[in-house]
Structures are given as C-alpha cells and as structure tokens.
Image: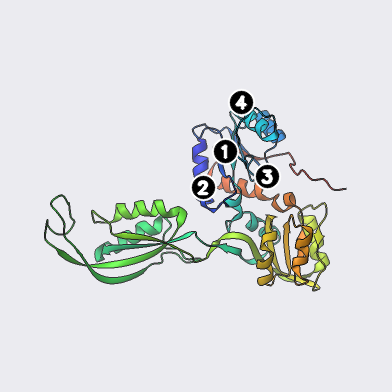
C-alpha cells in the first residue's frame, strides 16, 4: 500500500476543499510513492512523536494539527518545526495533516465529541456556504436513465438526507453538425430538432471533476451541452461546530462534572449558569469563540469549546453557559476518530495511536 492510496482515501472522506484558508492540510512531508510500513496517529507532531515512530519502525504520521503552518524559507534555523521536518526526511517518514477539513465535516471532530456526550438529533452549528454547485445538462429523452445513474454514482443529486435528486424540463434542442462532426443524430449541414430534457443536479464542489467525467462518458452526444453554476445555499453536512440534545435534562453542576470526567480536564472555566438544567448542547473542538453568536441564536443551554479570551465570556450575556475545557482536551478523541476511519478501509499495515501526551499545558 502506497502513501498515495492513503492520501486519496482521506481526501475522498474529508475533502481538502473544506479546510480554512489559513490552514495547511494534506501530505506535508514525504513521497506519495512510498510503501507504508505503519501509521502513527497523533493530535500534534512533536519530536517525541517522531522518535516514537522511528522506534516502532512506522513511516507515516497522521496528525490533526499541521506541523507546517507558516512559510519556511530555509531549514538551517534549528527551530522545532525544522528539526521535526529534517528528522522525518532523514528517516523517510511521511507527515500528513487532517485539520480543519476534519473540523468542518459532519462526521468529523465534533461528531466524535457529540458521540462521547451521547448527544441526539445533532446537526452542524454553522453550516458552510460556497461548497455547492448546480449542474445543468441537456440530453435526449432515452439517455436520462444512463445519465442519472452515472451522476448519482459519483455523488451528484444529493440534498441533505436525500439522494437520487434531480429536476427536469422537457423541451426542444436544435443543432446542425458540420462535416467534421460525428453526430449521434443527424447529418452534416442539416439542422435537427430533438426532444430533450434539461436536467438539474446539485453537486458538491469537490465532486465536480468526478461527476463531469462520468457525465461526459455516459452522454450519447459528441458535444455535451451543460452548464455549471456556483450556488450559495448552505450545506448542512459541512461547517463549524455541532449542536444536539441530551436524552434527559441534567443539572448544570452534574453535567459539568460529567464533562470534566469524560474529557479528563485539568479544570473547566465557565460562566455563571443562567438556568438549573442542561438539555441543548453546542460544541466545537479546538478554538470555538467565533461560534458564540451561533450558539446563542440556536438557544443552546451550554457551549463547550476552548481558547476563550477574558472578554469572550461576557459575550454570553447571561443567556448561555460557556465552558472552556481546554484545546487539547476538546480534541483528544480526534486520533481515535482517524484510527476508526482508517481501520474501515485498510488492513495491510498497522494503525497505532501515539503513546505520547502532546498537551503542552499542565495544571496545578
């Protein structure tokens, strides 16, 4: 199994198009033609994690946080990032980062947190825009079943929990081939009129290439009349944070103790409770203060995340309990999530979680 195969699987599952503009996901160090000996999964890449991989004869490290965030102009400066990169190159270790594309996926980081809290009726807290396209394609009537099948099998025609979706109109298409054409219908320099369908499909932007290739291959015409349009509908499957409900109301203090135990928190910083019970829970792994207004707007009882600044706690305005459980603590189950995903697909190499606790913060 090659590193390339691993990259393709991860990027089909959690597309790179979902990463934020500041992020740096994907294969950061290594050759994608390298044969995989084993995979080590960690939240962060530290020198100790690389040493662990060397000791275990593992040549791929998958981390949530990228080791390379900023531009690197040289490798002569002995800073932490450079030391890690050089050591990985020396030992032929590939580094792969799966960060905000995992955060922004409905089966990603926040889904795992929701699972740990047994949340029900979960949905993305702040759905993304700009991830959807509309495909319009014109076809002869008899070609509809074939085109439908090709487009649906490559991910087109999905709307939320529904698949095999399209809208079609019947009309008349006209065309006149020249003497260089190889028409399915008609002859050179004779204008034809054919009953055709105008069919519309929703397509996720990262699936455009696959859907387009399938459409071209399945279409009976030499020239396929079609159009692509970006649309600004929200995509309920992708976006930041998650919100859901507990099966039963839980007293605030009991729920905070549950969080502290479940996430092994050194401490929890939280705002004064505005109500005695918790039912609706908003979550965001990592730094989530930017979702405060979304949690308020959706009337969450508590918002669990990390890295809130002093003044962020005031923004709750006594209408929401804000619980800062720590960055590492909020994302610690991400490694488990990645391992589970890989084990669904691969059995030809060992998949291990790091034994190193990479949390840089200690509590007294």
Residue at 65% from the left image edge and 32% from the top image edge: 82
Which residue corresponds to mark 4? 90
Which residue corresponds to mark 3? 43
Q: Which mark sits nearer the N-terminus, 1 or 3?
A: 1
Q: Is residue 111 left or right of residue 257?
A: left
Task: From this view, report whether residue 66 is shown above or below residue 135.
Answer: above
Local packing at callout 2 (Cα closer than 10 Å; few below 14, some 14-19, many 20+) is: some
In three-dimensional space, the C-alpha distance between marks 1 and 4, rounded to whole angstroms, equals 15 Å
Q: Is residue 213 left or right of residue 158?
A: left
Which residue corresponds to mark 2? 11
In-front residue for pair 71/359: 71
Where disc 2 sits, the SS reads helix
Give the image location of residue 194, x and y in percent: 19, 66
Residue 298 appears in the figure: no
So how many labels did they put on this image? Answer: 4
Where disc 3 sits, the SS reads loop
In three-dimensional space, the C-alpha distance between marks 3 and 2, rounded to whole angstroms, equals 18 Å
Q: Which mark sits nearer the N-terminus, 4 or 3?
A: 3
Q: Which mark sits nearer the N-terminus, 2 or 4?
A: 2
Does the residue at mark 1 contact the one at mark 2 (Cβ under 8 Å)? Answer: no
Looking at the rendered image, the disc whose residue lies closer to the viewer, 2 or 4, is 4
Which residue corresponds to mark 1? 28
Q: Residue furthest front?
A: 73
Q: Residue furthest right?
A: 364
């Amino acid at each position: 199994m090659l590193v390339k195969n691993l990259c393709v699987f991860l990027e089909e599952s959690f597309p790179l198009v979902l990463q934020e503009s500041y992020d740096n996901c994907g294969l950061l160090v290594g050759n994608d033609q390298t044969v995989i000996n084993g995979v080590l999964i960690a939240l962060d890449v530290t020198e100790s994690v690389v040493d662990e991989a060397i000791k275990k004869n593992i040549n791929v490290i998958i981390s949530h946080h990228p080791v390379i965030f900023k531009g690197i102009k040289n490798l002569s400066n002995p800073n932490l990032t450079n030391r890690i990169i050089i050591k990985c190159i020396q030992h032929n270790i590939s580094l792969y980062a799966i960060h905000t594309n995992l955060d922004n996926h409905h089966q990603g980081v926040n889904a795992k947190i929701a699972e740990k809290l047994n949340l029900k009726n979960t949905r993305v807290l702040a759905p993304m825009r700009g991830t959807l396209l509309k495909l319009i394609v014109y076809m002869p009537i008899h070609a509809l079943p074939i085109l439908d099948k090709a487009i649906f099998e490559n991910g087109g025609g999905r709307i939320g929990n529904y698949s095999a979706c399209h809208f079609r109109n019947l009309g008349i298409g006209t065309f006149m081939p020249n003497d260089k054409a190889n028409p399915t219908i008609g002859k050179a320099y004779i204008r034809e009129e054919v009953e055709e369908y105008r069919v519309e499909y929703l397509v996720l932007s990262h699936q455009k290439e696959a859907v387009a290739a399938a459409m071209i291959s399945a279409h009976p015409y030499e020239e396929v009349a079609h159009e692509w349009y970006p649309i600004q509908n929200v995509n309920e499957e992708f976006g930041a944070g998650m919100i859901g409900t507990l099966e039963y109301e839980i007293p605030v203090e009991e729920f905070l103790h549950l969080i502290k135990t479940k996430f092994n928190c050194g401490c929890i910083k939280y705002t004064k409770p505005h109500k005695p019970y918790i039912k609706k829970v908003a979550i965001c792994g990592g730094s989530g203060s930017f979702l405060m207004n979304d949690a308020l707007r959706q009337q969450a009882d508590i918002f669990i995340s990390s890295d809130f600044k002093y003044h962020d706690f005031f923004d709750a305005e006594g209408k929401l309990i804000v619980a800062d459980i720590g960055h590492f603590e909020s994302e610690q189950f991400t490694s488990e999530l990645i391992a589970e995903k890989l084990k669904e697909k691969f059995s030809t190499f060992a998949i291990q979680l790091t034994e190193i606790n990479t949390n840089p913060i200690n509590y007294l």
